[in-house]
Amino acid sequence: SQQGEEDPQALSIQEGENATMNCSYKTSINNLQWYRQNSGRGLVHLILIRSNEREKHSGRLRVTLDTSKKSSSLLITASRAADTASYFCATDEGKAAGNKLTFGGGTRVLVKP
Amino acid sequence: NAGVMQNPRHLVRRRGQEARLRCSPMKGHSHVYWYRQLPEEGLKFMVYLQKENIIDESGMPKERFSAEFPKEGPSILRIQQVVRGDSAAYFCASSPGRASQPQHFGDGTRLSIL
């Protein structure tokens, strides 16, 4: 499997529910980032968590990172219809790797009103 | 608009033609990355450039593809003699180049090959 695999591939929830998606990766990382992509648009940066951090919050978003398991999770609380989008995790292996990002295949989230 | 600007948003080419995709990074950003996205997939790294230098082109096909980021003007991703398999969305991202800084993405160029 690839670096930065998301699970599940698709998620359908009712407005107000929480959405949780997971990301696994294989190599050592400098940081892990989560992005959102609306249909036909570019990626919007949501949150960056460094390898020495375990949890980070931003508004209704909560990200965890477990470097021993090489996994991360993104929780969106109290979802809204506007949260409907694809969500991608991306790993940054640091300056030696040019800080290029390696993306997973994404989780497609549908929030039904 | 201080964001990453890509143009054109949509580009249609016939097989064998050339495609030129442009990217102007965010103000103050000197690092540019190009990624390609096939339908229903994540983005795949192609090339990383700084002004007048290609730093990492390990994700770029060896033939027909080239990229530049001149001292003046936008970064250009050039695809010569396009084939159907080049149809994809091409995204540019920029960053200031400091450690643990997010990349900021443009809205992409959707390339369709007839």
Image: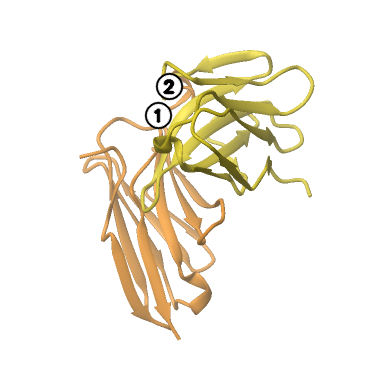
Provide residue A30's location: percent of width, then percent of height. Answer: 41, 32
The kind of secondary structure element at disc 2 is: helix
Chain under callout 1:
A
Provide residue B16's location: percent of width, then percent of height. Answer: 51, 28
Rendered position, B106 above or below B85: below
Looking at this view, name the residue that lies furthest to the top.
Answer: B53
Amino acid bearing label 2 = Ala
Q: Which color was chain B given?
A: yellow
Along the viewing direction, whichever of B11 and A94 lies nearer the viewer: B11
Chain under callout 2:
A
Residue B98 visible in the displayed image? no
Rendered position, B8 above or below A55: above
Residue A93 is marked as: 1
In the image, is A28 to the left or to the right of B85? left
Rendered position, A36 above or below B96: below
Is the C-beta separation of discs 2 and 1 under 8 Å?
A: yes
- Residue beneath the point at 79% across and 49% down: B1
- Pointer 2 residue: A97
Q: Same subunit under labels 2 and 1?
A: yes
Q: Residues within 10 Å of mark 1 (few under 14, many from 20)?
A: many
Q: Residues within 10 Å of mark 2 (few under 14, many from 20)?
A: few
Q: Which color was chain A given?
A: orange
User: In 3D space, how far apart are the residues under numbered discs 2 and 1 (Cα atoms)?
Assistant: 6 Å
The kind of secondary structure element at disc 1 is: loop
Amino acid bearing label 1 = Glu
Rendered position, B68 above or below A52: above
- Residue beneath the point at 53% across and 40% down: B90
- Residue beneath the point at 30% across and 50% down: A23
